[in-house]
Amino acid sequence: DGGITQSPKYLFRKEGQNVTLSCEQNLNHDAMYWYRQDPGQGLRLIYYSQIVNDFQKGDIAEGYSVSREKKESFPLTVTSAQKNPTAFYLCASSSAVGTEAFFGQGTRLTVV
Amino acid sequence: AQSVTQPDIHITVSEGASLELRCNYSYGATPYLFWYVQSPGQGLQLLLKYFSGDTLVQGIKGFEAEFKRSQSSFNLRKPSVHWSDAAEYFCAVASGNTPLVFGKGTRLSVIA
C-alpha cells in the first residue's frame, strides 16, 4: 500500500532530551513536510523539503532540526531547545511543493 | 503572505440537515485551495481541491466547494449531513511553489 508512515504513534520523553520522529513515504514524492498541531491552532509548518539534501525552515522551526538524506525519509528531531514540545506532529508529502499533500497518521509527543 | 481564515470554530448541525463551512483566504494571485478532514487522533484526508477551471468542485463523501474570487472564499458544502461527518475540517491555500497554509479548523458536531 502506498502511503506515509509515521512512527511511533505515541512518544513520551523527559524534559531536556532530544527525540526523533520518523516519517517514511513510498509515494515517490519529491516534497515532504512537518507540521505541528496544537488545539485551536490549526497546523503550523515546521520544516519542508523540496528535494533530497535540501530543506527550508517553516514558520516555527526554532528548536527543531531535520534531514533529508533519502527521498523516502524525512525525520524530525525535537531538541531540548524547543520550549513547549508537547504536541501532535504530522508529516506529509506531495509530488511538488504547493500541490495536494498526503498526510501520515501523526505522532503524539508528550514531554514530562 | 498567504493566510486562511475559518470564522467558525465549532458548528453543530442535525443529521440530515445541510452544511456550509466558511473559508476566506488572502493571496494576491489565483491560489490553489484545499479542504481536508481530520478525525480525532488521526491524520488529514483530502476532501477536494481547486486549481483552476470550474469554480464548483466536487469531492469525496458528497462534499462540494465553490471558489468565489470576488469574495476570496472557498466554502465547503454538503446537502445532507451524516453522523459520520463529525470531525474537524481544515481549509488550506498554496501557490505553485509554497507549502500549504492551513486555517485553524472548524469542528463539526452532528446531533440526532
Image (cartoon, rainbow, N blue to C red):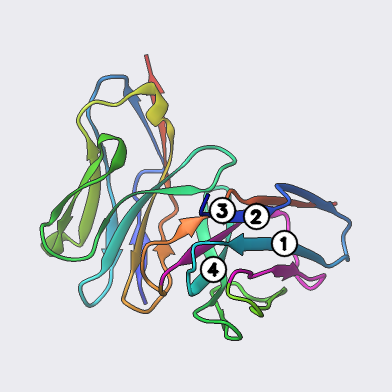
Q: Label 2 to label 4, Cα distance in Å?
A: 12 Å
Q: Label 4 to label 3, Cα distance in Å?
A: 10 Å
Three-letter code for the amino acid on which mark 3 is drawn: Gly
Circles 2, 3 touching at the beta carbon (< 8 Å): yes
Three-letter code for the amino acid on which mark 2 is drawn: Gln
Q: Label 1 to label 2, Cα distance in Å?
A: 7 Å
Identify the mark at residue A21; answer none if there is no mark. Answer: 1
Range drawn in magenta: A72-95
Three-letter code for the amino acid on which mark 4 is drawn: Tyr
Label whose residue precedes the other's in the sequence (2 or 4): 2
Label whose residue precedes the other's in the sequence (1 or 3): 1
Label whose residue precedes the other's in the sequence (1 or 2): 2
Circles 1, 2 touching at the beta carbon (< 8 Å): yes
Chain where mark 3 sits = A
Which residue position is annotated with label 2? A6
Q: Nearer the viewer, residue A15 or A30?
A: A30
Q: Confirm whether circles 4 and 1 share one chain.
A: yes
Which residue position is annotated with label 3? A104
Which corner quadrant of the image does residue B34 belong to? Answer: bottom left
- Label 2 sits on a secondary structure element that is strand
Magenta stretch: includes residue A39 = no
Q: Find the residue positioned furthest to the bottom.
A: A53
Q: Find the residue positioned furthest to the top.
A: B112
Q: Dot 3: within a 10 Å radius of its alpha carbon, few (fewer than 14), some, or many (20 or more) residues? A: many
Query: Residue A3 placed where, x, y %?
Result: 52, 54
